[in-house]
Amino acid sequence: MKESLLDVLCCPLDKHDLELEDAVGDDDVESGTLVCTECGERYPIEDGIPNLLPPDMREETPA
Amino acid sequence: MKGQEWYQADDVAAEYDDKRFSRGGQLIDFREKAAVLDALSPLEDKRVLEIACGTGRFTVMLADRGADVVGLDISAAMLQQGRTKAQAAGVADNLEFLRGDAGRLPFPDDHFDTVVAMRFFHLADDPHAFLQEMRRVSRDQIVFDTFNRYSTRSIYNWALPMGSRLYSAREVHALLEANDLSLSNVSDDFLLPYGLYRITPNVLASPLRSLDRLLGNAPFVDRLSSVSYWDATVDEPVE
């Protein structure tokens, strides 16, 4: 995921901005966490692909 | 969502393109890509979101033609296939993949010029809700396909791993209207169902397709086509 995608992405639940934490990789983020600035929900970046599945779908959906 | 687990299996994702789009399936791939290109061109600098992008068949093509593309899917395994494909095609710069729920998109209103969903609505348990969400993030255009109720698709539907939802033209028109979308174009194709093409060897696939087109052009018969490609425009809000 390119860091510039952050300008576009928002929280799937409340559509507020996301912040990138613990980023590994430079322009191309390989892993890290996207955190909603409003509700605090955390979305992992796995193998370069952000996982923005809402928490209720994450559990029932295997990786 | 139908097929949710099936599409997430690593072996299904790895074999997906080969199983679906080799042999006679190449013709389906070709036709679907033509439908998407017809609807979306010109692509230069267009912001496109593809829902249920799977292994990136369309996302990679669109990025290659200059669009700024985001591909969303529920399956990490399918997306990794797409990522590999994008890197091999050298289009990774204007293409992003992400995992997400088509019913709750992680984008602000009106962000994209066009939202595309191919091979998606036949798996949708609540088509209205999904279309509404696609419309929310699209400024201008929505493009999708449906498998048709009154067609040869009905006959072989039972053989599919998760069944699929079939639509009549009337249902699609109602869905568009309910979401303030105007139909700009629709084309119907494949009198013979996809499954038949998939099992047909290359040498016979072209003659089969010619026969399909010939029959499909006959008056009244085109109504029986198994697939429709829909191209709709977002209505301007009334001031």
Image (cartoon, rainbow, N blue to C red):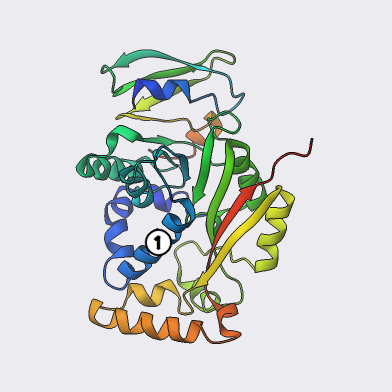
Q: Quadrant of the C terminus of chain B?
A: top right
Chain of the residue under label 1: B
Q: Which residue is mark 1?
A: B34
Residue B108 visible to the viewer? yes
Q: Quadrant of residue B171?
A: bottom right
- What residue appears at the point 59 percent right and 33 percent down from the top-left corner? B110
* Number of disc labels: 1
x and y, in percent, of residue A9 in the image? 48, 25
**B108 sits to left or right of B25:** right
| Mark 1 Cα-neighbour bin, 10 Å: few <14, some 14–19, many ≥20 | few
Extreme-right residue of the structure: B239
Extreme-left residue of the structure: B88
Say which element carries label 1.
helix
x and y, in percent, of residue B54 in the image? 39, 48
Pick whichever, A63 or B43, lies toward us: B43
**B221 sits to left or right of B14:** right
Q: Quadrant of residue B204?
A: bottom left
- What residue appears at the point 52 percent right and 43 percent down from the top-left corner? B114
Q: Is residue B142 above or below residue B71?
A: below
Residue type, mark 1 in image? Ala
Pick whichever, A4 or B38, lies toward us: B38
Q: Is residue B65 above or below residue B119?
A: above
**B156 sits to left or right of B150:** left
- What residue appears at the point 71 percent right and 47 percent down from the top-left corner? B180
